[in-house]
């Protein structure tokens, strides 16, 4: 699977994520129109512009956060490995490109699940609105964990695997908790 | 035989006479009040006499007084049983937030009047069915420096016409529950009249029928609740049986974000009126309103012309020009007849409403407790899951064999680790950055998207993809 994922360039994943997020926002008519209604923008053109902007912003922010996560994770890993004298073993043993590809791939899956649940709940049981938010955030968490385990970890030796996960989980956890609370 | 026939004839005559005199007293005075049996006439009289019913003004009070006089003349009383018209309209104050200059928010206190007439069934402790409609308007109301000029002829006056007609038609009915005819003031201000009615009501509510903009739109629509309800199923059957052309909720009702303070985080036209505040208190509710409720973005008042509700275009002349007198008459009488038929089904309606009331409430799902519980619960859950996985992996790591570090022992100074060019893509350069010790860099070089398949652990120059 990793080989298949690796064949697609990162920019293509980014564009797909942006499009998926735009579609998820479009189905999320309740959330989408929050801003639109506030400013009286209820036309189809305004809605399309809004979802495109939301998609682009989500994709862009996701990419920026990935850089930050990898960069901070790398430094945390360096600290966690302070007893190891060899620098080669003190850098994150996963490739940044592989990290970005896999996380983007699983974020797309998470967004698709979100769009599906959102549509289902909106039209079948709209009062489950918060339930949808819960499912959406939970699926994102599950997909981020899946991304770590699906990543090419052939360079992660067993003795480093715990600290490698911890190094990435700390920035991811902080960003996730902040985003859920906000 | 002749005697037998004579007795039979006399008996038949007496029976006929008895039947005639046993008819409700109401039929005797029906002629006096029949003028408003036609909902259109009631609407036209009301809209013509009181084009300005601006909230908090004497014009609104005059309209309230007129409504109270009509209701008392048909034998209705106020909450305490008084038949004096002055006791029937109830003044109240309310506060709402107004945005000025697009960004400044301030609290404004206004006052208005609710006109509520009661029809008592005579049974102690009987529940109350509320039939409500907005009646005031914002014609001379000044908001953010502008006079709104909105007469609410279609939104409020048409609903008043239908409700007056219903009141006339039900005045002699014998029911097993009490009925309140509530003409609500200041509904434009986040349903202030409905909120006031609910806060001052002490009687157990059987249900609520809320009429709004019944004369508007391409269709008359009915909406019950966000979930299927027993009373909804019953009422749909009644409407189908009588052949009333009343549309239900479409698959996509056209959601938008909740902007006026209910506990649901969203809204649609079905819950955009005061009916929502009855729903919030788990009162089985029927919302009758005119609209072109096709679903999603296709929904509007009419497919033929633009929306007029809550605009300066909502005046009598413009309303009748757009919708024509005949169509409005037909619509208002349809609404009035439909409600009359429902209420006259008495025991069956009461049973359906009671069954709906006994259904489990979903309001816990959309409460603040649920919202914050899910939010913080999710954050906590995420931390616990991540920590658990980390602990499990760390345990596994502990038992694993480590390489012989003596080979690279000359690189042990942790503080000497060179900085990475993390934000190099933004134009920042870091001097002396080329001396990184990662041996893999030599082979990976500039890792663009297409030349790095992800199998090389190129931990440096992570932003080279751009």
Image (cartoon, rainbow, N blue to C red):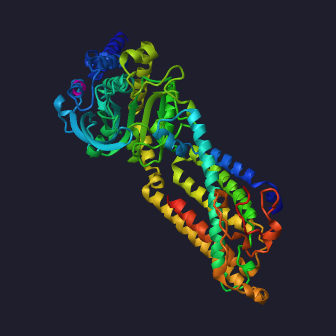
The rendered magenta stretch, by its main secondary structure, is classed as helix
Instruction: Report x, y in % for residue B439.
Output: 79, 74
Residue segment shown in magenta: B63-68
- Quarter of the image with the N terminus of chain B is top left
Depth check: give the residue in front, B89 or B417: B417
Task: Judge left or right: residue B410 versus residue B320.
Answer: right
Q: In the image as oriented, which residue stretches furthest toward the top?
A: B2
| B57 versus B409 height, above or below | above
Q: Residue B345 or B67: which is nearer the viewer?
A: B67
Looking at the picture, tell me which residue is in the foreground, B318 or B105: B105
- Residue A158, how many percent across, how many down? 75, 80
- Residue B111 painted magenta: no
Q: Please state, as top left, top right, bottom left or bottom right, where the C terminus of chain B lies in the image.
A: bottom right
Q: Is B405 placed above or below A174 here?
A: below
Is A54 on the left-hand or right-hand side of B36?
Answer: right
Query: Measuring 70% from the left and 78% from the top, which residue is drawn there?
Result: A90
| Outermost bottom residue | B406
Percent coordinates x, y for residue B239 in the rendering: 49, 29
Residue B440 position by quadrant? bottom right
Residue B121 appears left or right of B241: left
Residue B289 visible to the viewer: yes
In the picture as drawn, the residue positioned furthest to the front comes out as B431
The answer to if B64 sits in the magenta stretch is: yes
Vertical position of residue B160 compared to residue A182: above or below? above
Q: Quadrant of residue A169?
A: bottom right
Q: Where is residue A98 in the image (x, y as percent from the top left)?
A: 75, 63
Examine the rendered structure and indicate whether residue B332 appears above or below residue B326: below
Residue B177 in sight in this render: no
Q: In this figure, what is the number of numbered marks? A: 0
Which residue is painted at 22% across and 29% down in the image? B57
Q: In this view, does A143 lie to the left or right of B199?
A: right
């Amino acid at each position: 699977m990793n080989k298949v994922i690796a064949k697609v360039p990162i920019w293509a994943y980014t564009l797909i994520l942006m499009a998926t997020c735009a579609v998820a926002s479009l189905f999320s008519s309740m959330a989408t129109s929050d801003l639109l209604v506030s400013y009286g923008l209820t036309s189809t053109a305004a809605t399309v512009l809004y979802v495109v902007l939301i998609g682009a912003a989500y994709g862009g922010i996701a990419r920026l956060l990935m850089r930050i996560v990898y960069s901070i994770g790398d430094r945390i890993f360096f600290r966690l490995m302070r007893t190891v004298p060899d620098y080669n073993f003190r850098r994150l043993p996963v490739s940044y490109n592989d990290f970005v590809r896999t996380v983007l791939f699983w974020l797309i899956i998470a967004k698709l699940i979100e769009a599906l649940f959102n549509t289902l709940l909106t039209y079948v049981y709209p009062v489950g609105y918060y339930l949808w938010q819960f499912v959406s955030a939970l699926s994102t968490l599950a997909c981020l964990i899946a991304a770590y385990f699906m990543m090419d970890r052939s360079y992660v030796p067993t003795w480093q695997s715990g600290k490698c996960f911890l190094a990435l989980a700390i920035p991811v956890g902080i960003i996730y908790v902040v985003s859920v609370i906000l | 035989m002749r005697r037998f026939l004579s007795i039979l004839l006399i008996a038949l005559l007496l029976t006929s006479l008895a039947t005639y005199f046993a008819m409700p007293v109401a039929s005797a005075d029906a002629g006096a009040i029949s003028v408003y049996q036609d909902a259109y006439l009631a609407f036209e009289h009301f809209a013509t006499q009181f084009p300005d019913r601006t909230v908090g003004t004497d014009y609104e009070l005059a309209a309230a007084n007129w409504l109270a006089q009509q209701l008392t003349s048909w034998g209705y009383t106020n909450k305490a049983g008084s038949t004096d018209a002055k006791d029937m309209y109830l003044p109240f104050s309310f506060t709402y937030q107004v945005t000025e200059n697009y960004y400044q928010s301030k609290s404004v206190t206004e006052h208005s009047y609710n006109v509520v007439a009661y029809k008592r069934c005579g049974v102690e402790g009987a529940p109350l069915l509320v039939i409500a409609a907005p009646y005031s308007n914002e014609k001379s109301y000044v908001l953010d420096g502008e006079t709104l000029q909105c007469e609410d002829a279609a939104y409020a006056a048409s609903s008043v016409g239908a409700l007056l007609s219903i009141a006339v038609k039900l005045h002699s009915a014998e029911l097993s529950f009490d009925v309140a005819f509530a003409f609500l003031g200041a509904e434009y201000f986040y349903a202030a009249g409905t909120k006031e009615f609910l806060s001052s009501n002490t009687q157990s509510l059987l249900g609520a029928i809320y009429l709004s903009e019944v004369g508007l739109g391409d269709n008359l629509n009915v909406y019950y609740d966000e979930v299927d309800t027993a009373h909804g199923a019953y009422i749909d059957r009644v409407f189908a049986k009588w052949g009333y052309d009343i549309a239900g909720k479409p698959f996509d009702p056209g959601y938008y974000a909740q902007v006026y303070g209910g506990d649901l985080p969203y809204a649609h036209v079905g819950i955009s009126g005061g009916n929502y505040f009855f729903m919030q208190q788990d009162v089985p509710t029927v919302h009758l309103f005119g609209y072109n409720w096709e679903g999603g973005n296709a929904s509007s008042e009419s497919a033929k012309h633009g929306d007029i509700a809550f605009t300066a275009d909502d005046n009598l002349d413009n309303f009748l020009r757009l919708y024509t007198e005949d169509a409005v008459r037909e619509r208002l009488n349809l609404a009035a007849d439909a409600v009359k038929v429902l209420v006259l089904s008495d025991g069956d309606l009461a049973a359906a409403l009671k069954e709906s009331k006994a259904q489990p409430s979903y309001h816990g799902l959309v409460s603040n407790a649920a919202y914050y519980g899910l939010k913080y619960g999710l954050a906590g859950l995420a931390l616990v899951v991540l920590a658990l996985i980390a602990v499990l992996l760390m345990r596994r790591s502990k038992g694993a064999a480590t390489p012989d570090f003596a080979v690279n022992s000359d690189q042990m100074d942790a503080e000497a680790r060179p900085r990475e060019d993390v934000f190099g893509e933004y134009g920042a350069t870091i001097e002396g950055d080329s001396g990184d010790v990662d041996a893999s860099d030599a082979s990976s070089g500039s890792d663009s998207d297409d030349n790095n398949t992800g199998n090389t652990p190129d931990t440096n120059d992570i932003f080279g993809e751009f």
